[in-house]
Amino acid sequence: MVALIGGSATAHAGQISVDDALAAAEARNPAVAEAEARVAQASGRGITAAQWVPSRPELALGVESDALFARDGEGALDVGISQELELFGQRGLRIRVAREDRAARSFDVDDERRRLRAETQAAYYELMFQERRLALAADVAETATRLVESARQRVGAGDLGEAELELLVGDLALARSDRRAAEGDAGVARAALDRLIGENDGAATATTGDFPALTASGDAGALAARAVDERPDLAAAARDLATARAEVALRRRERLPNLTVSIGYVYDRGVLGADDFSPPVIDRAFDADHLFTVGLSLPLPLFRSNAGEVAQARGRTAEAEARQAGIEARIGEDVAAAVARRDAARDRIGELDEAATAVATTLARYEKAWTEKHIDLAEYLAIRDRVLAVQVSALEARRDGAVADAELERAVGGDAR
């Protein structure tokens, strides 16, 4: 662990662990909710696709009467119902399209979580770095304040020159400026983490614990092969491709005509005159017929080209193939780059941690040496700045290692340690 000039960052009421931050991000981040909403939409399309008939049945009602003309009492009542039927498996293909699409959207949720985990970890450890850099800057400003107060007493006693006092006053101004800059950077980092974990603006979010300890990375080739099996974006791309291919088959099948079946009832009442009887025994009589009807109909032309819909589906297939190939091509590069960054950060941490611990224990002795006039002020300030640079570099290495670890997890699609 890096030995800091001022120790760990100050604890706040809003302290949160990295695991809690990840849980909050998955529960509150709108990107995950948006992806889950797309799954719900796909499920709705699946319900529609599973319907047995492509449209609702149609009910027809007709009435005939001569009331406006001869008024002989002739009339008819025609009631019928018709239903379009699919005979060539379109329903099965629609279900297949909907099923593959829903699976792709489910993998999108997993992929959003994968990306969100890496982004949240990076934001968390960036805030941890800025908190500790702020602690260093605050301690430097406190030390500079103490030295200025001591120098003024020594100037009054004639033990120190005005030039050295002015140098210390300037150094104090720089230290306070650095502290304010560090406060601003910490605020920016805190706001970035709050956005990801769903905290309100102004929340006193603070980190706890330490940067993760980095073990040796695994073989990049083996990790890349594992990523091919585990990356949800690649799985989603494969399902999108399956969806597009099923849609091509569906659009081709839709070239074939659907059959419409209709059944009905007809009541027909006619009028018979005296001429209709032999011998003419009556002047007029009514004749009523009850009929049951069955009909079949097909659209014309029987076979439509459906060329536009098929071309669009083929275009989506080509797009899905290209996207899948692109993800596969990038996986090896993503994993190799993440492994390289993580290993480089791990090596830097090993070198800088030891140096930071060593120089931090000597700084107090150099301050005492200047107070006792064994070294001059310029030498002490140079040593102080060098110690601070080593401390900050050690923190940067720890931060970079934590971010690289999160990036490797994102590249592989799971814990790569």
Image (cartoon, helix red, strand yellow):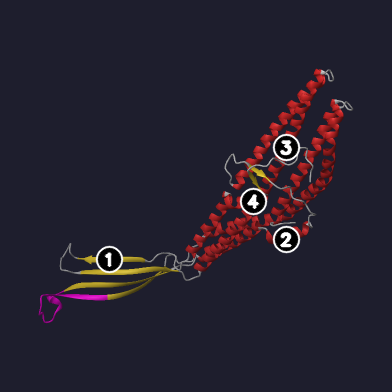
Depicted 9 relative to depicted 332: above or below: above
Q: Residue furthest bottom?
A: 279
Part of the protein shown in magenta? 272-290
How dense is the environment of label 4, judged by Cα within 10 Å: few (below 14), some, or many (20 and up)? few
For the residues labelled 1 and 2, say whether their Cβ atoms are less than 8 Å apart.
no
The three-letter amino acid code for the residue at tag 4 is Asp
**Magenta span includes 323:** no
For the residues labelled 1 and 3, say whether their Cβ atoms are less than 8 Å apart.
no
Residue of label 2: 226
Q: Secondary structure at mark 1?
A: strand
Task: Look at the image and tell me whether residue 202 can be seen.
Answer: yes
Image coordinates for residue 21, horizontal then vertical, percent: 64, 49
The three-letter amino acid code for the residue at tag 3 is Ala
Between disc 4 and disc 2, whose residue precedes? 4
The three-letter amino acid code for the residue at tag 1 is Gly
Q: CA distance from mark 4 to mark 1?
A: 69 Å
Between disc 3 and disc 4, whose residue precedes? 4
Q: CA distance from mark 1 to mark 2?
A: 68 Å
How dense is the environment of label 3, judged by Cα within 10 Å: few (below 14), some, or many (20 and up)? many
Residue of label 1: 62
Q: Is residue 194 left or right of residue 371?
A: left
**Magenta span includes 282:** yes
Q: CA distance from mark 3 to mark 4?
A: 24 Å
Q: Which mark is residue 135?
A: 3
> Would you identify the image quadrant in which residue 327 lies?
bottom right
Circle 4 or circle 2, nearest the eye:
4
